[in-house]
Each structure stands twice: as structure tokens, then as C-alpha cells.
Amino acid sequence: MRLAHLADPHLGFRQYHRLTARGHNQREADVALAFTRAIDGVIAQQPDIVVVAGDLFHAVRPTNAAILHAVRELSRLQRMLPKVPVVVIAGNHDTPRSSDTTSIFGLLNEIGVQVADQSARRFAFPDLNLTLLAVPHQALFEAPRIAIEPSGPAKHQVLLIHGETPELFGADRSMAEPGGAMLTPAELSGPWGYVALGHYHVQCEVGEHQWYAGALDYCSPNPWGELHVEATGKRPGKGWLMFDFDTQKVERHVIEAPRRFLDLKRLDATGMTAAEVDQRIAASVAKVEGGIAGAVVRLVVTNVPRPVGRELDHASIRTWKADALHFQLDLRRPDAVDRQSASGAPGKPETLPETLTSYLRARALPPGMDHTRFVSRGVELLEVVEREATGGDG
Ligand SMILES: [Mn+2]
């Protein structure tokens, strides 16, 4: 008995201004292709059940293209594996924030996908001897909080949930995705056969048989941090997971990346002239295997005084920018505070959720109030306002 676990496809995600030949945002097309490749892989592997652990869509009101793609791919999955149940939960990105926003998940229900988008639902699959508790993002903000525990006689008890597990990040929250619900140790520690998590975009194991499948492409605000963590954990690339209840083993299925993300080795320009810095940058770019054409590239150069930065060969830099899908030459002044030397987007100003998080974390609270939940609820509310201000396309 095998379960395929996908998470965070973020269909409809857009980034940069490059368009495909047909006039679509290139990164939106990439994310769609990543989902197609994951579905291809799942079909080839023929699992007994498929789960998607939230953030199927990047926004509450996805584009028509994103909706069409989701319906096409999930219909294809069901056509190719007609007896295999498919269960999808809503994550923080695709949960409607007000009751007047009708959820797009109703459409998935129409094509036979099992959906939990507001409240938690327990699905029984007697043929598989499996019961699945599906907990969407919204269900974690109901008061009182729902009981998250196995139930019923089924041999295999599965928890499908979207949120942040305790101790995932510790003190350094540079990799944390804003807006996620906080899960408690008790909720995860029940006698679950498998816990299929969504929300954190890096594939990782957080407990025995408790996994984040990770996103299918680099679509968080911090792709460079994701790359770094993946490399550190020796788990490069994006993909999905297969859990085998008989062997109790988890198998990674990496998908071919639609887009190359390259974080070039950072340079230190201490004491260099502009011409010398130019040379070093050109050498770094020239060294890239296969060239930088079509890739998303970052090159951090530290200790670049303002006058040196101004004198750089901007014609060459423009050529690289035109060649790559996105070329980020990140020049840091000698006095720049290196907040996140290994990961993150150092030197960049804090985002509003980051500022709010540090502010709320420093607040004194009445006794008995959960500080972590207080902070995540605050960021949550900020997201609501941001999305309403941007017409739900957040
Ligand atoms: Mn996500």
C-alpha cells in the first residue's frame, strides 16, 4: 500500500517579466510544467492514494490559466489511475479569507477530487484499510481548536495537514514562510502511520514518518535560502514523496527542474578596482556550465564601495541580464550588515511580515497566551489586508 505525497504546487505563481512565446509569464509556465511532471511521475508509479498537502494555487483567486491547468492535470491523474483516491487540502495561500469569496476548490470536488478547504474532514478508504484526517489551513484557526488525532478501526491512519511544525526553524527564522499555522507536538505525535505535511518548501523529514514533500519549484520569497538548505541537507532539487506502508520506507521522486536556479560563489571585492571586479564577475559567469542562458542567477559581491559599483561595466551586466531569465548582481557595500550570511536575501530590507514578526515577538502577553500562535495570527491578519489591497492576487 503506497501513498504519493505532493505539496505546494503554487499554480498561478508569477515572477519577473519574461513571457513565453504565447505571452504567458515564464515562471507561471515553469510552475505549471513542474506540476505536470510531478503528475507524470505519480501516474508512472501507480500509488494507491494521492494527497496534495495545500497551496495547490498561489492565490485565493487563481488565474483562469492556473485553474484550467489544475483541473486538466488532476482529471488526467484520475483518468489514468481511476481507482486511486485523490485528496487535496487548502493551504494558507489558497484559503478564502472571507465568506463572500467562493472557494475554487468546489470545482475540484466536481471532478471527483476529495477536498478539505475550510473545515477538517476525515475520509475513510475501507479498501485500503486507511483513514485520512485532512486538516486545511483554515481549520487550524477555529476556536476551540479541533482535535487532531487518529480515529476508527483502520490499520493505516494518515494526517494530511498544512502548517509549521514545532522546532522546524529554531531561532533563525530566515527560512520561515509567513502566514502558516503553528502545529503543536501533541498534534503530530499521535499514532499516525504517516503525516503528510505542506507549507515549508524544502523537502524534509521532521519526525518518524512525518515529512514535508516540499514545493515543486522555487516559488517562495527565498529561493536562495531553499537552494542552500537543500544543498546542506544533501537533498538537491524539488519533487514529491512516496510512502510505502508495508516497507515503512519513504522514497524521493525528484522532478526535472523546469528552470535552473544558480547561486554563484560569492566574491569579495576588498581592495579591488572596478576593472578588477569586472574581470572577476565575468570569470564567474563564464565558468557556469552550460552558460547562464534562461537561468535565474544570483551573484553576491561583498565589499563594493559605491564609486566602484558605479564604474562597473554596465554594458556587460546588461548582456547577462538579457541572457539569463533573471540575473541578480547583488553588490554589497563594505559597511553592509550581513544578516543572513548563508541563506536568505542578505542586505535586503526587511519585509513587512518580518518587521511585524519581530515586533510581535517582543510584546509581553498576558499569562497563558500562546506567543507563537499570537505572532502567526498577526502575520496572518496582515496577509489578509495585503491580499484585499491587491485584489486577492497575493
Ligand atoms: Mn506554500
Image (spheres, helix red, strand yellow):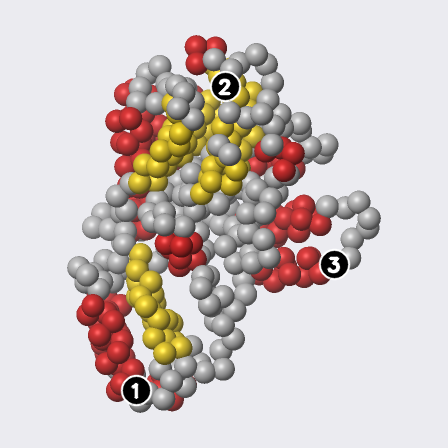
Q: Left or right of 187: which side holds 212?
A: left
The first of marks 2 and 3 along the sequence is: 2
User: Element at badge 2?
Assistant: strand
Between the residue at mark 3 and the residue at mark 1, the CA separation in whole angstroms equals 46 Å
Numbered disc in front, either 2 or 3:
2
Amino acid type at circle 2 is: His
Name the residue located 32 percent from the left edge and 36 percent from the top edge.
253
Residue 238, given in percent of the width and then of the height, sits at: 35, 44
Number of residues whose C-alpha sits closer than 10 Å to that of mark 2, classed few (under 14), some (14–19) or many (20 or more)? some
Q: CA distance from mark 1 to mark 2?
A: 63 Å
Q: Quadrant of the N terminus?
A: top left
Residue wearing tag 3: 363
Q: Dot 1, crowdedness within 10 Å: few (<14), some or many (≥20)?
A: some
In the rendered image, residue 285, in percent from the top left (x then y), is placed at: 23, 69
Q: Nearer the viewer, residue 107 or 201?
A: 201
Residue annotated with mark 2: 156
Instruction: Name the residue type under label 1.
Output: Ala
Q: Which residue lies under the disc numbered 1? A: 274
At 35% from the left and 14% from the top, the residue drawn is 83
